[in-house]
Image: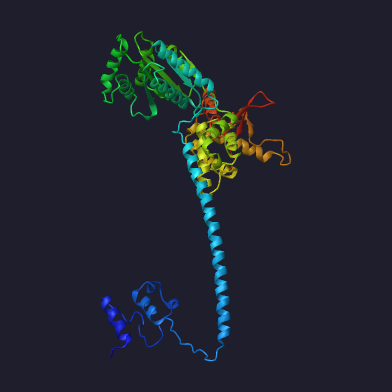
Amino acid sequence: REMSLEDVVIDDLSEEHDVFDSNEHDYSFTNSPPSPSSLQQDDLLSDEVIFDHLIFNQDQEVPVEHKQGEDEQVEDEREDEHEEREDGEEEEEEEEEEEVLEETEEQREVIRCLRKARRSLQLNQLPKNLPGRKEQTNELKQSLKRVLSEKRSTCIYLSGVPGTGKTVTVQKVMRKLENLRNEKKVPEFRYKEINVLKLSSALQIYSLLLQTVLNVKKSFNPKVTHQKLEDIFSKPTKKKIPCIIMIDELDQLIHTKQNRQILYNLLEWPTRKDSILTVICIANQVDLPEKLPPRLQSRLGLQRIQFKAYTSSQLVDLLRSRLADVQDAFEPDAPEYCAKFVAGRTGDARRALALCRRATELAEEEKTRVGDRHVVAAVSEVRMDMIEVTINQLSDQEAVLLAATIIELRQKFSQLNPTNTNLNTKEIRKMVVRVRYLIVCTGLGVAPVSNPILNVMFARLESSCLFKRFESSWSRLDNLYLDVDLD
């Protein structure tokens, strides 16, 4: 009791901290403690100063003397008014809480629909039907049924630009045939999907094919599997079970001599008398058989099924079929807007699905249905990414050609009459770009390419997201139309 509060505080702080420097700060408690504004930044972080303010800045309770003669009736009236006010506030708070709960439940339902829609739009989700691909589906299905019923083999070539439903059509048909097989309506068969891009080496095709033929999961040495497959497809056997192999990205097998030999074997085995192998080949190039050596052309061109780019109406049907179970997630016009954008450029169904998935993510952030504004925002994001990737993938000569095109368009824009709205500032003749290309090459000290290679470069640029190609109504010369802003 003899120690003052000042002594106790200083003793406690001294025990907690080894060094107490009284010269650095004035810790004398005879005066009022330092104000926070007068402290340095490091002072505000020190335990001593925080402790000082906690101890000496506490509010002191001051006793209040009540008047003995205060009217008790007035106090009762005030208490009644206070109780009524509290009751009214509680009722208002309950109403607000009910509204918040209702709104939250609606938002939760919207989020559930959006997430379900996003799962339905995944590429690995096999759709219930394939709008716009009925003809190709029926042709492939009938061909495979004949192969199984007649116990023969063949090669079927599916071609079309990326995103036209080639792979998913084969998967859909094979799922139906597998169901028929389980119901004993078609003969027994084995099926395997092989994507060349997913293989570390093309020789793995032999091992995967042998596993399918023998119905085993054992891994084989690629150097040995080729001879085993030769024996299987050459020697007659009564117990052979037909095998159907899908080779996706077939055009990846034409670049090296070793890969071309593998491709030749895959196409040659089905032609043998005792073979039970059917190969479904999928590639992007329609004229790929004509580019192959003569010994491959005759085998790959036995049966062809072409897939054209999706139209706007087909893409709308495709998106709505995917969203049939979650129609409330999208506003009625949102899928149509997305389909029109994709159909006007590539007709790639995968891009349409990707745009809708991104639109659902943007709508989920706002906890609302997918509308046109979400699709527009998704298109802007995806389009900028596409443009950046396309430009980065251009070769040096293609970059020079693109620069020549932009220079001519900028010069044309500067010479145009702003009041003439009929002139299209993004349209230019190829002949003009060719001349500018030669000028740019000369200025850079780069040797220009020949006209045939230049035509190939034009075709590559036109097939990208940067340009559109069309025949001008007022000229027979091919024109270029830049599909992005000059800036």
Which quadrant holds the N terminus?
A: bottom left
Q: In which quarter of the image is residue 403?
A: top right
Q: Check the image and tell me how it is coloured.
A: rainbow
Q: Can residue 88 be seen in this view?
A: yes
Q: Which of 300 and 144 is in front in this view?
A: 144
With respect to residue 238, does 311 lie above or below?
Answer: below
Q: Which of 90 and 460 is in front in this view?
A: 90
Q: Residue at x 69, y 26 (%)?
A: 473
Q: Which residue is drawn at 57% across and 68% down?
A: 88
Q: Position of residue 462 (x, y in %)?
A: 56, 30
Q: Where is residue 116 in the image (x, y as percent from the top left)?
A: 48, 41
Which quadrant holds the C terminus?
A: top right
With respect to residue 92, does 387 lie above or below?
Answer: above
Q: Position of residue 32 (x, y in %)?
A: 41, 85
Left or right: residue 193 compared with residue 462:
left
Q: Residue at x 49, y 45 (%)?
A: 112
Q: Nearer the viewer, residue 290 or 207?
A: 207
Q: Where is residue 332 in the image (x, y as percent from the top left)?
A: 60, 39
Q: Quadrant of residue 477?
A: top right
With respect to residue 197, does 100 lie above or below?
Answer: below
Count the marks: how many? 0
Q: Can residue 445 be seen in this view?
A: no
